Image (cartoon, grey):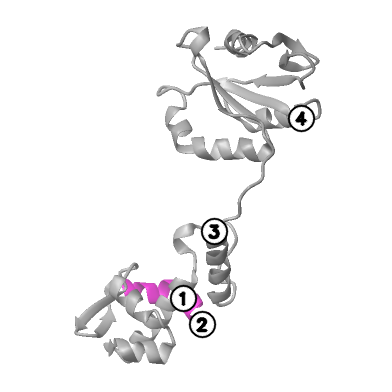
Amino acid sequence: MRETDLYPAIKQYLEKQGYEVKAEVTDCDVVAVRGTEPPIVVELKLSFSLPLLMQAIDRQSLTDEVYVAIPKPTKQAGGALWKRHKRGLLKLCRRLGLGLITIDLKKSLGRAVEVHCDPLPYAPRKNKRRTGRLLKEFAQRVGDPNQGGSNKCKIITSYRQDALRCLSYIDAQGAVKLKEIREKTSVERAGGILQKDHYGWFTRVDRGIYDITPQGRSALDTFRTAIAAL
């Protein structure tokens, strides 16, 4: 496959909308003009990539109507990756003010082009709920126990810190009542932490009484630095 294989479908698609279309005009792969409207520029590539985005962003100095066009991914070539990341790629294109087109070369020219988004100004809506969760986690977390870019499975969240407080207290006291754990550790959500037991650290030995599992014993060593910081 070559980039030039994408051109006929793009040309026909735009010409059907009344544009005059020409290829390779001052470094632009495709340029379409209709009357006095701003020109449309389409950059063709065989895959979605950073160089493609950089090229398209450069074309925004010529016009706001810039599209990137790639072959439609197939099961044999990038289909799974496209399906997994399509939403994120569209979000990225919208954020950059770019349009995104895929071309299915197995279809006839008239049916090959699919426009996934047009180049429009991007104004992201803020998610107040997510912002609230972000600030709540920031405020509740004690110190700065993580390294930026570290493995997600070992992240010390405020929830994990509370679980470690409970774990440390039970380790010191032995099997103990939930009410006492909550009072002595000041962990208000101790009940949910011990009952849900996301980490497999706790076991109920009697009604309202909890002890530590072998996995919890191991966690005492794994997170000893984090426990000491609490």
Which is nearer the N-term, disc 2 or disc 3? 3
As measured in the structure, the alpha-carbon distance from the residue carrying label 4 to the one carrying label 1 is 48 Å
Please report the residue visible at 71 percent of the width from the left and 20 percent of the height from the top.
Answer: 40
The picture places residue 150, in percent across and down from the top left corner, at: 54, 59
Q: Residues within 10 Å of mark 1 (few under 14, many from 20)?
A: many
On screen, residue 39 versus residue 114, left or right, reads right
The picture places residue 152, in percent across and down from the top left corner, at: 48, 58
Kind of residue at disc 4: Gln
Q: Is residue 228 above or below residue 51?
A: below
Kind of residue at disc 3: Ser
The local secondary structure at tag 4 comes to: loop
Q: Nearer the viewer, mark 1 or mark 3?
A: 1
- Identify residue for label 1: 161
As measured in the structure, the alpha-carbon distance from the residue carrying label 2 to the one carrying label 1 is 8 Å
Kind of residue at disc 2: Leu
Which is nearer the N-term, disc 1 or disc 3? 3
On screen, residue 58 versus residue 88, left or right, reads right
Kind of residue at disc 1: Gln
**What are the residue bounds of the magenta stretch?**
215-230
Which label number is shown at residue 150?
3
Closer to the camera, 187 or 41? 41
Q: Nearer the viewer, mark 3 or mark 4?
A: 4
Asked if marks 2 and 1 touch (Cβ < 8 Å), the reply is yes
The local secondary structure at tag 3 comes to: loop
In which quadrant of the rendered view does residue 188 lie? bottom left
Which is nearer the N-term, disc 2 or disc 1? 1
- Identify residue for label 2: 230
Secondary structure mostly seen in the magenta stretch: helix
As measured in the structure, the alpha-carbon distance from the residue carrying label 2 to the one carrying label 3 is 20 Å
- Identify residue for label 4: 60
The picture places residue 173, in percent across and down from the top left corner, at: 33, 91
As measured in the structure, the alpha-carbon distance from the residue carrying label 2 to the one carrying label 4 is 52 Å
